Image (cartoon, grey):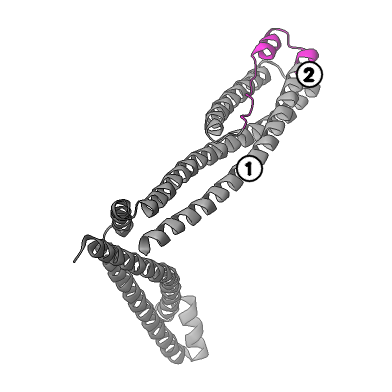
Amino acid sequence: MTDGEQIQTALSGAEQARVEQRKFGERIALLDQQVDESARQVSAAREALVDETADVEKLESFSPTRILAELKGDRVERLEREKAEQHAAEYAVATAEARLAQMVAERDNLRGRRDALGEVDATWEQALAAKERWLVTVDPDKGAAVSELAARIGGLQAEAKELSEAIDAHGRAVLELEGVAEFLGSARSWSTYDAWFGGGMIADMAKHQKLDEASARMRSADTALKALGAELADVDVQPIGELGITDLTRTLDLWFDNMFSDFAVRDRIVAAIERVETTLGALHSIGGQLRQQRDDVATALTRRVAEREEVLRA
């Protein structure tokens, strides 16, 4: 057998293993759903058995149910009927448990067969790489074309990774800012109440604690936005500006507790809310752009991988 024939045989074997693994995965996914449904049926059957057993126990014990049945003269008949229903419930539980055990065993068997195939994707890629190296020696033009495709695939994979990291950072920033917006919304209402109805030392302390928490939340949002900005730079998207809040208003309000300082605090909170909402709007726009870029890269990557595999299969 020539080198080319050996390489092609290895490639065919690796492809067959991939097909088998995919089929196993599909069957296992279906069994996962069936196992979940079967487990729910077992749970329902067990609950029904508990109810039927309770009905029997009521008629067998000195309970109001038994006394009433004896007064009516149908206790024996009702007890037999309830026992029959209890036995039927026991049978339903046993049947459901047996069905569940069978599905679990079948799924475990398929998982074992799938795992026995090993790292099929790695084997497949090794086979493709071997074919690619061989092509360079026997057909330089074709080998160069495949190498170019491999380079494009590598670049797209790197871009996909950067986009994934940017999307993760974007999600964290959105969560931080949504938390800030929610907190500042409640702080604005609290500040308005304090301005009109008075406060005192206890209220002042509570207000300062709220402002401290607002500052901490916004610093956390700053950090998330800076991290996002670094990730956006890797995927050619303009970063978002930082947030910030000073302690000036807090300090003034601490020493000059009057209507003016209360409104100053409220105005600062309102301004912060507006800035957060503006930033959230920009983030939502950027999120859409990132997801579109991710989808475009995924489509291009799938196409290039298919092109490379088509050439190397031949």
Point 36% across, 52% down: residue:
143
Given this view, does label 1 or label 2 mark the residue nearer the observer?
1
| Identity of the residue drawn at 70% across and 13% down | 249
Instruction: Inspect the magenta stretch and tell me whether residue 198 lies in it.
Output: no
Say if 127 sits above or below 206 in the image: below
Mark 2 residue type: Phe
Q: Which mark is residue 263?
A: 2
Side of 222 where 34 appears, left or right:
left
Specify the quadrant of the image occupied by residue 257: top right
The amino acid on which the numbered mark 1 sits, given as a three-letter code, is Gln
- In front of the other: 69 or 146: 146
Q: Nearer the viewer, residue 10 or 203?
A: 10
Query: Residue 84: which disc?
Result: none
Quadrant for the C terminus, please: bottom left
* Residue under the point 36% across and 68% down: 19
Give the x, y percent position of residue 50.
42, 73
Q: Give the residues drawn in magenta, as a range.
A: 238-263
Q: Mark 1 to mark 2: distance in Å?
A: 39 Å
Q: Residue furthest top?
A: 255
Asked if residue 283 is positioned above or below residue 218 in the image, the reply reads: below
Q: Badges 1 and 2: C-beta atoms under 8 Å apart?
A: no
Q: Quadrant of residue 90?
A: bottom left
Q: Which residue is mark 1?
A: 289
